[in-house]
Amino acid sequence: MAYVNLLPWREGQRQRQKKEYLSILGLVALLVLAVFWLIGAGVDRLIENQRFRNAYLQKEIAVLDNQIDKIKDIKAQKNAIEQQIALIEQLQSSRNVAPHVLNELAMLVPAGVSFKSLERTGNRLVLEGQSESNNRLAEFMRQLQNSEVFHREDLSSIIANSNNSGAISDFKLTFYISPSISPEINVTEESKK
């Protein structure tokens, strides 16, 4: 006789398969959670490392900015000192200019021309004086023109003086000292300090 198993074996097999499926599903879920946790921990570690690097870079940038500010201050001081040195050199080179100018004027002035005032501003000279005749004044201007010490002569005014018995004229003459004799002095506000 044939042996027939009447027990609900299919039901038991389904229950076993369901338990296996649920346990595999639970293991996979745990494995996925563990992987996500490891990835999250790795990302957190990378973020923390980057924050540390950023803080270090910010600190070094602050140090470099401080050094750059010091370098700018040193360059500004250097420029001020260079300007002062240039001014001193210009003053040193032009300290003998006044006697040289006066000696040259004494040699160039013809008889019959006299000076009332001489004013110097930089290399610009303004001369006020009197002349017995316009010919003597013209001779004086020609001699100034031929001089190596002076240039750019300009007769600003000539006024005939009728109060005197002679034909004396008052004149105002502007001319410049040659740069070869006296270089221009450039005075800036920083070099005055």
Image (cartoon, grey):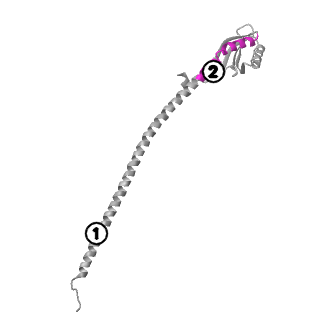
Q: Residue 117, position in %: x, y?
A: 66, 12
- Residue 46 in view, yes or no: yes
Q: Viewer-proximal residue, 178 or 9?
A: 9
Q: Amino acid at mark 1?
A: Ser
The disc at residue 70 is: none
| Quarter occupied by residue 150 | top right
- Residue 189 in view, yes or no: no
Q: Viewer-proximal residue, 45 or 113?
A: 45
Residue shown at 42%/42% (left/top)?
56
Label 1 packing within 10 angstroms: few (<14), some (14-19), many (20+): few
Q: Residue 40, position in %: x, y?
A: 35, 56
Q: Residue under circle 2?
A: 90
Circle 2: element type: helix
Residue shown at 22%/82% (left/top)?
8
Q: Amino acid at mark 2?
A: Gln
Find out whether residue 31 is within the magenta segment.
Answer: no
- Which quarter of the figure is the N terminus placed in? bottom left
Question: What is the residue that sits farthest to the left in this orientation?
Answer: 7
Label 2 packing within 10 angstroms: few (<14), some (14-19), many (20+): some
Find out whether residue 95 is within the magenta segment.
Answer: yes
Q: Main secondary structure of the magenta part?
A: helix
Q: Viewer-proximal residue, 186 or 9?
A: 9
Q: Residue under circle 1?
A: 23
Q: Viewer-proximal residue, 79 or 113?
A: 79
Residue shown at 63%/18% (left/top)?
92
**For the magenta stretch, what is the residue range?**
85-110
